[in-house]
Amino acid sequence: MKSLWKSGDPFVWLSGGALALSLLMVAGLIGLVLRNGFGYFWPGDLVELGLRSGRVVLGEIVERQAIPDPGAAVGERVRYRVQVKQGNRDAYGADFLWIDEDDVVRQRQPADAVVIERREWGNAYGFVTAVKEGDETVARGADAWRALHSRLPETTRLTQEIRDVETGTIGAISYEQERIRVQLRGLQRRNVLDPEKVRVLEDRARELQAAYDQELARLALLRARLTGAAILAVAGAGERVVPLEQIVRAERPNEMDIGEKLAVYLSKVWEFVSANPRESNTEGGVFPAIFGTVMMVVVMSILVVPLGVLAAFYLREYARQGAFVSAVRIAVNNLAGVPSIVFGVFGVGFFIYTIGGSIDRFFYADALPTPTFGTGGILWASLTLALLTVPVVIVATEEGLAAVPRGAREASLALGATKFETMWRVVLPAVLPSILTGLILAMARAAGEVAPLMLTGVVKLAPALPLDGFAPFLHLDRKFMHLGFHIYDVGFQSPNVDAARPMVYNTTLLLLLIVLALNLTAIVLRNRLKRRLTVSAV
Amino acid sequence: MSDHAAGALGDVEVSPTSPPATVWSSRFARRRAVDHVARLVVSTGGIVVVVAILAILLVTGSEAYPLFLPPRIASLPAVPAPAASRAMAVVADDYREVAAVVTGSGIEYVSLATGGRVAAPGVDLGGATVTAVSRLGREEGVLALSDGRAIPVTLGFDVERESGTRVVVPALRVSAPVVIDAAGRALTRIAYAALEDGSVTAATVGPRELAIVRATITPALIGSGERSEHRAAITLATRGSITSLAADRRGDSVLVGTDAGEVAWVNLRGSEPAVGAIVQASPASITSLGLLIGDWTFVVGDEKGGVASWQLLDTGDGRFGPVRIHEFEGHAAPVRLFTASLRNKGFWTGATDGSLRFHYGTTGATLAAVDAGEPDLRALELAPKSNGLLACSASGRLLSWEIHAPHPEVSWGALFGKVWYEGYPGPAHVWQSTGGTDDFEAKLGLTPLIYGTLKGTFYALVFAIPIALLSALYASQFMHPTLKAVVKPTVEVMAALPTVVLGFIAGLWLAPTVEPIVPGIFLMPPTVAMLILLALAAYRALPIGFRLRIRAGTEIFVLIPIVVLGGWLAIELGRGVETWLLGGDYRTWLASTLGLTYDQRNSLVVGLAMGFAVIPIIFTIAEDSLANVPPHLTAGSLALGATRWQTAVRVILPSASPGIFSAVMIGFGRAVGETMIVLMATGNTPVMDPSIFNGFRALSANIAVELPEAPEGGTLFRVLFLAALILFVMTFAVNTVAELVRLRLRERYRSL
């Protein structure tokens, strides 16, 4: 025993245990997100449970757990309970229900049980008994399901058309109207009472109003054509009417084979990444958040690369080496350790209120007191993150510069090239991979950062994307949505956390994939670079 | 080093040799110009970035700096107004253009620009004179008359616009007189509270006699409702006679000061007014009495010039009464005048020698002192927006001052020390920046937030440091290099995980998962360690021939399942311990034995989650410094017969210790500034409780939650900038120390 201690192996093994724990935690976290994220879109079987009380529950079983019973004697049989997603929030009030397994007397999987994904009120579970068109019943019983499916494509097309009119045509008119309103106010403010100008603007406003009314009439006509409804027999809540335009998807999962299920799964995944959120972000897709995240990262990259590269070249190639440059270098390194929220506060104080406020006073005075740039927006968020990530680019570029052999520079200078030519033709090409590595690391950091964005322009639901079809197309003053903030908002600010949780796991998975992919690219790039440099050094 | 080489190269003057022809020379000139421009651009760009870094410190600092500026008080030109010499009270409009001066003969309006009279209808006094006035201002007050009646009045102002310019017009509203003293004695002092369903009036009719009238209007379906009056007369059992009187706006209390230095509290809450308490507030006669906004704190001024604030609180013996809170910087003469802000707890006192002082009720600080230039001021009034002060002098002049005090509630003491807030039993550290009502007293104590930040950091480091350092030691010294090439990037990826993900997992998954297995979590370290040792013993019992075939540094493959097993075992053991030793439920046991409560989102959860975020950072830096220890040291030690553990602990650790120190420091910096994890995994309640089972609120999370709601330039806005500055300075200092230590380490390795 004594020799065991003396050998020191126990400590070696204990330290190995610590590393094992670290690795297990990473694996556990990623496994947890994967397990909860991927499963959600899979169409689960519907189960009908008959309870001891005579009540019947139809839904999906989402979880099974032991009932906590602190007072139980050791060895006593552990009882289990299941969590059933019963949906029909409008009928029951709650989507989820815990049921004691001991209370279940009967359990079956009816083949004709239907799950309907609705635009509002979440899922509905039940049996389709009839399909109506206005007040007239067009199909009943076994035909109803077929009738429902044959009508859905037309309804979907109509709702899509309505949405196009609402967001496209009417959106364009409102945008134009707002611009005319601001122009009129500007004329008033500057006391330019040129009647001709005012008349032109007012005529245009009248035209727009007429076009607006016309579109509204068209919408009313379109809406009048949406008359279909499905009648759904819901356990314990009688027959309920589900208007067809409310239906996103209607399936009978119990009679689907694996291929059909896979098709539904993929279409749901596609909806998740391509559609707008519904039901206060707890359903639908996260497309605006993906778009916002990507766009913010792109704008940040455009800003951060020149800044970081210039600073690195200045520090290593142009500035006279000495105490000052060493101090700056330490400061830059430390900047990477400054809390991100501090950058956010700086963004608020400097970008938004100082610079943005001035821009508003000089260029957007007509719209005041509504701020244009004097409030959070994607430009300020990107700038803040650019400042946050600039040390990453500086450090990476400096490392690259240090690795460029001195001989290369001297050879270039000896051949008569100026310093700039040496930098441009010899040094810069050699450090490009390092710059790229730095950029990718900066993008990974920016994509995952949330705290500074909360102060500088992220919102839970943005009315419009920062890039659209209205001139000037790129709206850097707009607020935007972000995947990371989406996680925080839906997971912690949502009124119905149970229903929102799968959505949060999916968003988390998406964000993790983006960040990990970026990081792995950077690591691979760095390793390849190292290998190349070692080769060239030999 | 290449730094020096590059610097030296930069100074080499590249001069092209003599150009053979003019074509060449122009080309050289262009190249030189381009080179010059490039140098300029790079240097400017570089300097811009360096300046931007400094700007962070400057901008954050400059937003917080105005908090600590003393108030600016500027004297405005005095205007002659004869009414001022007879003034009993004065009220100004929002724009400080017109003042209403109350004199014995009624109300006169005076222009503050010229001193000229502004024509306006007056009050019909019915032949009597005004003997006293209650608090006046935006809400209704009363004029006390010599015939025992009181006239409720509202000294309002209307703002009209005439061709673009602003005109302030007096809008006096007078209600029907109320008989306070049926005997018709003169009312010498009066206090009034306008209530939603009526009013309360208290007046002195004799040296110790108070008349209190409560008017109640019962709403009727049609018409103005029915008015009923309830009268009471009280004779105070005080030694001195009444010198001052004040009533709160809720109509709950009347406060009376006497010339023997007593303050009596008359409780109006019961069916009949009753004297609640009489305290000796001052050795000298009470000459001034007034309430601060919110009407919980009252200020007592005495004949010797002393100024103190009091609150109605539990006096310690279970009874309710006045308690002294703060003693302010006093005057050299009797305090006669008092006026309180309608916006915050600021107030002014004036003494008979013409000295005026600006105090702040929450902090107990006296912020400014002004000399009016003449004694015996008649009336003193803060402008409705608290941006000006108005005084009526005995010589018939209206004196006014411009006040610029945007952040009177802030002082170093209020930010970091204990403050006795309204309604609290004693001084306390409190952060509560916003409340439901306008007269809410903002509590801007940063100490609970700093405490929360440090608490979270502490628990995170307790978890992270041992694991990260042991992992780094193992990875750098004992692990097989092929494995290390895989493990190190994995841990680096762990560092790249967005903290919002960690926070979400901690708040929504870890917190509910940990709750039922807390005893198991605490048993985990010893259980896992025991199991590892058992596994080692078992391994050593294996035949040597088998052991030799296993490569050194691959223990990790055995250890991973052992750690999993240990974790599971610890949880099961924890269940057993809970049942047998803790009476079945550890939360009940915690509450009964240790007096601790259990929050679901607590410091344990934060410690685990934030530890998770910090581990890779400490690991990476520590591993780097351990791996960079010159290999000949290791080789020498091993050659001398030391075991690999001895080598690691006696040779490698000491030489790498600065690197390890800097790793821990940088981990500390990261934990201090972490926002999303603490935001999502704690309850965000700003309590100061060291218990691991309670939550906290950190500086960073506080900024994230409150800054979006804080109005620009306001006190809260600036205090949050100060909080950011504290975070910045804390992390920047720690990181700089770590960086310097690391640089020194590099030097040391170079010399080895």
Image (spheres, rainbow, N blue to C red):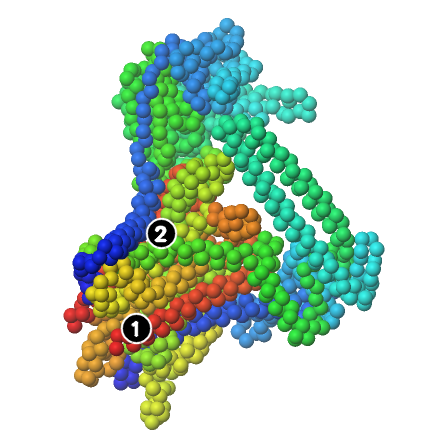
Q: Quadrant of residue B338?
A: top left
Quadrant in which the N terminus of chain B appears: bottom left
Q: CA distance from mark 2 to mark 1?
A: 48 Å
Percent across and percent down for residue A294 are 48, 58
Q: Residue furthest top?
A: B127
Left or right, B324 with reference to B582: left
Which disc is residue B308 wearing?
none
The tally of labels here is 2
Q: Nearer the viewer, residue B248 or A298?
A: A298
Which chain does tag 2 point to?
B
Q: Are marks 2 and 1 on the same chain?
A: no
Q: Residue at x 64, y 35 (%)?
A: A206
Which disc is residue B451 wearing?
2
Q: Residue at x 80, y 61 (%)?
A: A130
Disc 1: which residue: A533
Which label sits in the foreground, 2 or 1? 1
